[in-house]
Image (cartoon, rainbow, N blue to C red):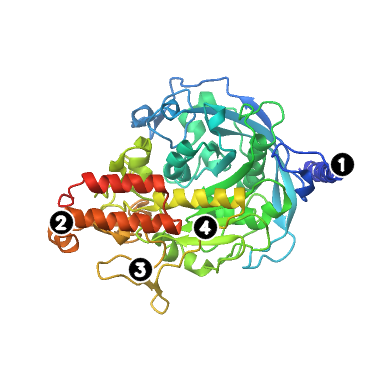
Amino acid sequence: MAYLAQHVRISRSVMALTSLLFLAIGCSDGNNNSTFEILKPQPPNPVVEEVTVLGGGPACCKIFGGVIDLRDQNYTPGTAFYSGLAFDASEVGYRETEFFIAGTATSYVATDELKEDGVWSVQEADAAEYRTRIVVRRPIDPEKFNGTVVVEWFNVSGGLDAAPDFLALHTEFEREGYVWVGVSAQSVGVEGGGGAFDISLKIVDSVRYGTLNHPGDSFSYDIFSQAAQAVLRPQGIDPLEGLSVERILAVGQSQSAFRLVTYFNAVNPMIDLFDGFFIQSRSGGGASISQEPQASVPVPTVVLIRTDTDEPVITLQSETDVFQLNSVTSRQSDSTNTRIWEVAGTAHSDIYTTLKSPEDIGTEPLIADIISEAEVRPPFITCSIPANDGPMHFVAKAALHALDRWVRDGEPAPSAPFLSIDEVENTFIYDELGNVEGGVRSTHVEVPVAILHGEGQPRGDSFCNLFGTTELFDSAQMAVLYPDKQAYIDAMEAASQQAVSEGFLLEKDARLIRARSVTSDIAVY
């Protein structure tokens, strides 16, 4: 192992020197950027393989001792397994393809004390072979590609490869022509043995995924880099089938956000790869740089986003994240390249992500309704209280748009105030109706039909404490707020226009919200 690690370090030193020589002669790279702008080496290219074994054998898809068959949960054997949509990609002009990628990944160790400011220095340590997978969704028509690739770090908290950012953002991807790439960067998603439900790739379909090999999460950062390199500057098989990439963004939610905080502070400064970062629902700290059986390299419990790099970062936070995940300790003022948006009326996860998104093709105004539902993700998660059905996905789409424009045109994303808190009591400050004050204000809190919180579920319910609550107003409260339907429509028109003008709502989503206000019966909730 020591020899292999040394060999990789030598190889990458040669690679770095070669990159600098290319700088001197002015070559261009696959990112359509002049290499005179590239001052850092590139990560290695993995081998990209077509998936030739479809899988779906007799043992496929049955989990929990055969009690649940994933074919009853919208999964089609022989296709990529992750928490995706319930309709075919072709219905919205897209094509989905899965690839295996293989190579040698490195772990990292710190070269100096890891301080709260996030200005960290690391070096390569051990090396290990890996074989994992990526999922690519691209416009069928190449002319519709907008030049931006969004690479998501799959979330494995549930014991499977989940794609919460894809679910929240997919309608914006589809209408604007983004390419999305999901990366199985962590061991649990591939090998199993962790998370709440243990639904790894090998457990779901051992025929299709049996040859994959993940050496452990200490190598996850480099695996994520190499997956992005495979689509940005492909060698051999091109997962994007010839599309010309102009920008590449990294995204991750919850535990994937924790890892992206560490990735941004420690790994990103070392390589030429990502142009921007979308970090959603982070904690106050980050993920370990390395862990057993490799060297244990934990990070501080409070970690800021470093501000000395060129790549812009938008951090999107829900109410749940502020106190429950302690992100209040990592609040920092906006800098030249960082923004934090804390969104009122939102939860760490919500009804849109788990129930609505899989069916949302992006054109149905009913998606703007606030519903009361405790069956968060049947048959897996049922809560005691109706979960949050707030506006996070609408704000997330605006954040993605703002980050893409920031990278594309140099126009910084708008700044937002923090959610209002009582710093003595460590609690939120609520308005007269019961919703949190401050933060990004959406139509759902400016023209409320419910109290939307990021907290409030009983402790002990599996995952439910992350889903917040929804308490719909009764007809008497609605009559006080909106004497007639036109009053509601007018209020929604004004609030949506304000949110669009501030940059926290996209006009296409505002039109859906306004259309639903016209057709809804505000007395029936």
Residue drawn where x is 44% and y is 59% of the image:
502
Amino acid type for the residue under numbered disc 1: Ile
For the residue carrying disc 3, how many other residues have a C-alpha within 10 Å: few (<14), some (14-19), or many (20+)?
Answer: many
> Where residue 175 sits: x, y (%)?
45, 37
For residue 253, say whether it is visible: no
Of tags 2 and 3, which is closer to the observer? 2
| Callout 4: SS | strand
Amino acid type for the residue under numbered disc 4: Thr
The answer for how far apart the CA atoms under marks 2 and 3 are is 26 Å
Of tags 3 and 1, which is closer to the observer? 1
Q: Name the residue under label 2.
A: 484
Q: Mark 3 points at which residue?
A: 437
Residue drawn where x is 69% and y is 32% of the image:
234
> Where residue 480 sits: x, y (%)?
16, 64
> Where residue 375 sits: x, y (%)?
27, 45
> Where residue 408 sits: x, y (%)?
61, 48
Q: Mark 4 points at which residue?
A: 315
Classify residue 450 as left or right of residue 285: left
Amino acid type for the residue under numbered disc 3: Glu
Q: Mark 1 points at which residue?
A: 25
Q: Earlier in the sequence, mark 3 or mark 1?
A: 1
For residue 85, say whether it is visible: yes
- Please determine whether, in this image, residue 305 is positioned above or below residue 60: below
Residue drawn where x is 87% and y is 43% of the image:
21
The reply to whether callout 1 and callout 2 are in contact (CB within 8 Å) is no
The answer for how far apart the CA atoms under marks 4 and 2 are is 38 Å
For the residue carrying disc 2, how many other residues have a C-alpha within 10 Å: few (<14), some (14-19), or many (20+)?
Answer: few
Amino acid type for the residue under numbered disc 2: Asp
For the residue carrying disc 4, how many other residues have a C-alpha within 10 Å: few (<14), some (14-19), or many (20+)?
Answer: many
